[in-house]
Image (tube, rainbow, N blue to C red):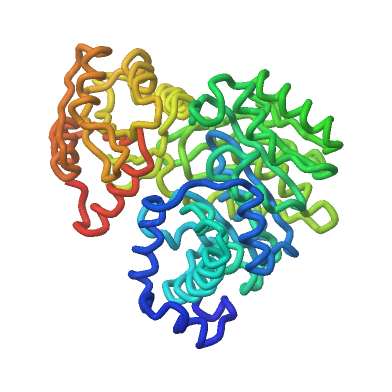
Amino acid sequence: MADSYTHSQDIFECPDHPGFLSYEEAAAYIEEIPRFTKKHTLEHTKEFLRRLGNPAFDRKIIHVAGTNGKGSVCAYLQAVLMAEGKSVGFFTSPHLVTVNERIRRNNVPVDDETFLAVFAKVMAVVRQMEEDGIEHPSYFEFLFGMGMEAFAGMDVEYIILETGLGGRLDATNSAEHPCLTVITSISLDHTEILGDTIRQIAAEKAGIIKPGVPVFYDGSSREASEVIRSTALERGAPCREISKNAFEIQEVTRKYIAFSRTNAYDKDVMNVRVPICGCYQAMNAEIALEAAEYLLREEEIHGERWQEALASVRWEGRMEEAASHLYIDGAHNPGAIEAFVESMKVLGADRGEGPVILFSAVSDKKYGQMIEYLCRNLKAKAYVVTEVDDARRVPAAELERVFRQHTAGKVLRRDGLAEALRAAEEERGEDGDIYCLGSLYLAGMIKKHIGRSGRHA
């Protein structure tokens, strides 16, 4: 997709910054950003984007916030829009293997050449900012600027922006005129920043609601819904609450979830299948479908195309079968762990001896609460704990200690990922399954490991 971004050769060669001559050097620089700067105000991000020329602000932007399900909703919405022949840019986070994954066109990550060209353009603006006494953007802010600059050089009609942390103060909220906002399920996460109650966190997420811009939201939480409705009313934003009454789950397997829904136009029943197991995926898909119906309300709708598109969605790290008997789930907060356990019970995975759980976490997550819920509510054959490759990692010894507080079952500690995967494989036996969760860093590490070795143990 090298020709999808319009750039000149002088930009690609980056004459102002000859030190960045390769994609690897640019990616390495970005990974170093957290070491020398931190998050800034929304005004700082707006100034950064203004200096870039407010790239891609003329496109149809869908802004998505929430605690869990953001990525899945975005992936489903992207698939439906593409099925109707729309060209879609998608800015998402975090990435699992390569940073390119955060900037996509029609679900294809930008290639290394495009990434480097965009980096060069953004880097030149950042250096000028620093010369003018304005601080360097944070890691997320820098990548967001890159994403918008990339989309500006691409033929995309729609841009889906997934918030990073929160909503009100998130860098993506500098896009002041989206055509639609979406808020997915809300639970306790990043409480040290967003607040320690559902209402406080919902208020932060609802910060993306704009005057007159419709908001579609997951109505599963009464407390969150009250905050979202109140915010929408204050800002004159039409709102649509999506409840579990909007669909009926028909079947849940390890390969897919099937549900039925009523089409908003002709009231015919639409049967939908998404190839990601997990009961919560029905709500995520329904939110995306209702959002797409609104966006395409003046066009002919091709329901069969939507069904085919959703049936082929692949969203990595979300109940993903990464290898035989090995599943990766990005559950990394208490709400996501609860949803994971619910799905396990529907699948009958807790019958018999139960699955083997491979777990790791970072220190700014409520890992103690996650572990306690797992141990109390899901039968497991064994727990294997390890460490993620990140400065915020929780030591494997600490994870082992917490697990032993809450279970009398087998708990194994392996500091290295390869050793942890081998231990999990040995424990699962001939017919058991392994579920890896607790951190998206862990999901990415496992995918890298499998990619290198071709096997998981």
Task: Give residue 197's position: percent from left, percent from top.
Answer: 57, 19
Is residue 290 in sight in this rendering? yes
Task: Give residue 167's position: percent from left, percent from top.
Answer: 62, 40
- The answer to whether residue 115 is left or right of residue 65 is left
In the figure, 289 relative to 351: above or below? below
Q: Quadrant of residue 359?
A: top left
Q: Identify the residue at image location x=15%, y=35%.
A: 414
- The answer to whether residue 83 is left or right of residue 328 is right
Q: Identify the residue at image location x=70%, y=55%.
A: 61
Q: Identify the residue at image location x=62%, y=53%.
A: 44
Q: Quadrant of residue 376?
A: top left
Count of numbered badges drawn on the protein: 0
In the figure, 218 relative to 442: above or below? above
In the figure, 67 relative to 24: above or below? above
- The answer to whether residue 94 is left or right of residue 271 is left
Is residue 263 in sight in this rendering? no
Q: Identify the residue at image location x=85%, y=56%.
A: 298
For this rendering, which residue is in front, 379 or 9? 9
Task: Give residue 293's position: percent from left, percent from top.
Answer: 76, 48
For this rendering, which residue is in front, 200 or 242? 200
Task: Give residue 251's position: percent from left, percent from top.
Answer: 52, 32
